[in-house]
Amino acid sequence: MQINYDDYLSDRSRNIPGSFIREILNLTQQDDFISLAGGLPNPQFFPVDEFQAAMQNVLCQNGKRLMQYGVTQGLPELREWVANRYRNLYGANIVPEQIIITNGSQQGLFLSGNVFINAGDPLMIEKPSYLGAIQAFSSFFPKFCPVDLEADGISLADFERVAKHSGARLFYGIPNFQNPSGISYSLEKRDKLAGLLRKYEVVMIEDDPYGEIRFSGEPVPPVYSHLPKQVIWSGSFSKMISPGIRMGWLCVPNPLLKYFTRSKEAMDLHSNNLLQAAILQFLTDNDIDEHLVTIRKAYFQQKETMRAAIETYFPPEIKITNPDGGMFLWAELPEGIDMQTLVEKAIQEKVMFVPGQSFFTEPNTKNYMRLNFSNASPENITEGIRRLSVAIERVVQVVAG
Amino acid sequence: MQINYDDYLSDRSRNIPGSFIREILNLTQQDDFISLAGGLPNPQFFPVDEFQAAMQNVLCQNGKRLMQYGVTQGLPELREWVANRYRNLYGANIVPEQIIITNGSQQGLFLSGNVFINAGDPLMIEKPSYLGAIQAFSSFFPKFCPVDLEADGISLADFERVAKHSGARLFYGIPNFQNPSGISYSLEKRDKLAGLLRKYEVVMIEDDPYGEIRFSGEPVPPVYSHLPKQVIWSGSFSKMISPGIRMGWLCVPNPLLKYFTRSKEAMDLHSNNLLQAAILQFLTDNDIDEHLVTIRKAYFQQKETMRAAIETYFPPEIKITNPDGGMFLWAELPEGIDMQTLVEKAIQEKVMFVPGQSFFTEPNTKNYMRLNFSNASPENITEGIRRLSVAIERVVQVVAG
């Protein structure tokens, strides 16, 4: 007799939504498939040789120490590098002791959920928001309270309304080149948001994986800079160096450090020492700003290619964003379109996008799609958009017919 | 005005006990300090050069692919290696699809808690048990139900009593060279335990980080071999290769794979590709069994050195185990001793152990200490035990006085 595992699962493990992207991974990895779905950086810019030299170096110099257990918060010198860079870049008040190294920023989000959220707690979240964050937070059963986004960032009026109405103490947002919408908060909005956070005593989890991938203009300081005692600021090496090394960080207000550290310890003791040291060595031996200039230029070109292809192939009623950084375009489709059918038609055409519903915590009447421009070559971007236009046309025909 | 974070913390983050070992880490890292506290492997045996060659190799061959995002369950070839090794070693029925690569076995325990435990669920656990597991599970608010250990493993009578009385559906145990007690389950006990698991429909989380560190005799198949559909079996590269690389695995029954994978995805997407590939390359290019022979011989000698020093220095009323593998001795001290005072005296003598209470989920009347023999040199082991005997003598004098 075999036991019935349905009776053994925690409520939590049943509550984590699947990821559309990971569910179609087998499909999109076929050779002749063009995926505009995933949020993958362009591997052309992974600094393989430089990283190899860095790894060689740290293993030679410090192999035995790095292969031993390490400190939960992370390698002190890497934490110092992070604190120094963003103190210099944004004039933000950050000390190395506040930095906790995480397994990519995804773990930072899960840790934040672990530290803050009891079942039923209201959690304000941008509408739409990052799918991976919705997954991470869902483990803790928050009551999601969506807040409208506008072209220049979070809607302050809606934020105030939701904060009052829900009594939420926690807000999760992505102020730079938001995933999926590409929207960035203006400097003024960041300042005013900080005022509202203070007024309503709301703590913000500020997710910033794309801040360094800015196509033009000066860096805009994070909300953290405006209110360092009330913001957990999360960053990542994924877009700067490589996502396969799974390394990011949290910048945590002092009174919370103990709780984040203990949660990280319970979860996996610490992040691996060898890669932390190799990242630090890579950052010391190479000019990361020069490297970032290369990535920014290329992604900007890829975005322009995608927008040009959309102008050529898509029906004109489809609205498209024009973000100044990051990795995604966000398209609004006519309301009549059945998105499930569009996914099926796209699969037939061997192209994929992410349907907008994945980014909402409640059913949404409007139809969106997220299009990734960072991962495909310019030729594949153009061809992918062309294929997608064929799929769209078929669905529109169905609607019209 | 600063907000009061006490009102913002989840119940969960308040419920994770601290780790004695990590709290005294700053002390024990002083140069003249001898720590018998941590569960650290001997860095002398970390295969730095071989690992460097392996890392070099995979970065050369596959750098761009490995630096990209990867699959949540882990590198298929590494999962295959794990399945093959333990199918061959134990004749266990394992296929690669069942293996999920984790950030050390600690993450495997946290994942298991995440998948199974609702607040208040009874969880059977050995008495005493591994501190890190108690930390990981505490995040999920189980009702810990301790089960007695005997010299040849879990007490079957007590297991049956607790299973009946608590109605627990989950049991966490370490059948090989248990941490902290060093106890191993006999083959007969494993078989009978499997029978009880079946009878009471209890799922076992079988933690096996030390199974490969056996000093003599033949490997004993895990409980998993007896009941593969009802056991989650957890292993680790920490003791085999290096703990600083944070890499382990879970072997999960098929119906549960979806839930473990989704939890891992929500937690950190996947374990880092580069180290997974380097581990596989290291295991392919080197004879791991030969490497393990070296470690086993050395740890056996270190254990013998510690036992000899204890015989020389400790008062004879202290009882000590003689495990046939692993990294720890477990000493029972006279009941009158105040352990807090002993810790203070030991700090004065610049030596440290872990007080037994850390390994119990409820107050315990007997006094124990866990002594690690894997990390210190033979000279330091002898000197450490001598220092500890001075500390013990002082506390015994206090009791007598």
Image (tube, coloured by chain):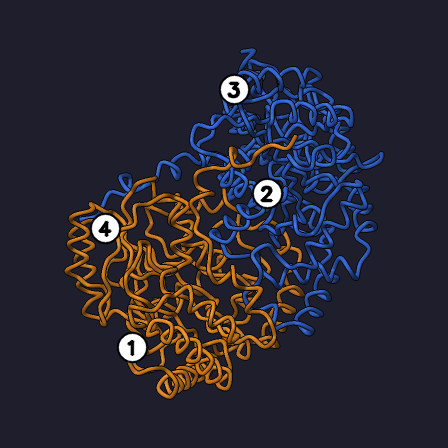
Chain colours: A blue, B orange
Disc 1 to disc 4: CB gap under 8 Å: no
**In this rendering, which labeled residue sits more in front, label 1 or label 4?**
1
* Relative depth, front residue between A255 and A96: A255
Q: Quadrant of residue B308?
A: bottom left
Q: Secondary structure at mark 1?
A: strand
Q: What chain does badge 1 belong to?
A: B
- Decide if residue A84 is in sight here: yes
Residue B192 disc label: none
Residue B202 disc label: 4
Q: CA distance from mark 3 to mark 4?
A: 41 Å
Q: Position of residue A356 (x, y in %)?
A: 57, 26
Residue under label 2: A255
**In this rendering, which labeled residue sits more in front, label 3 or label 4?**
3
Q: CA distance from mark 1 to mark 2?
A: 43 Å
Residue under label 3: A166
Q: CA distance from mark 1 to mark 3?
A: 59 Å
**Picture residue at 46% right of the left edge, 68% below the top:** B39
Residue B319 disc label: 1
Mark 1 and mark 4 lie on one chain; the one further toward the N terminus is 4
Q: Is residue A386 above or below residue B376?
A: above
Q: CA distance from mark 2 to mark 3?
A: 25 Å
Q: Quadrant of residue A36?
A: top right
The amino acid type, in three-letter code, at marker 4 is: Val
**In this rendering, which labeled residue sits more in front, label 2 or label 3?**
2
The amino acid type, in three-letter code, at marker 2 is: Pro
**Picture residue at 48% right of the left edge, 59% below the top:** B104
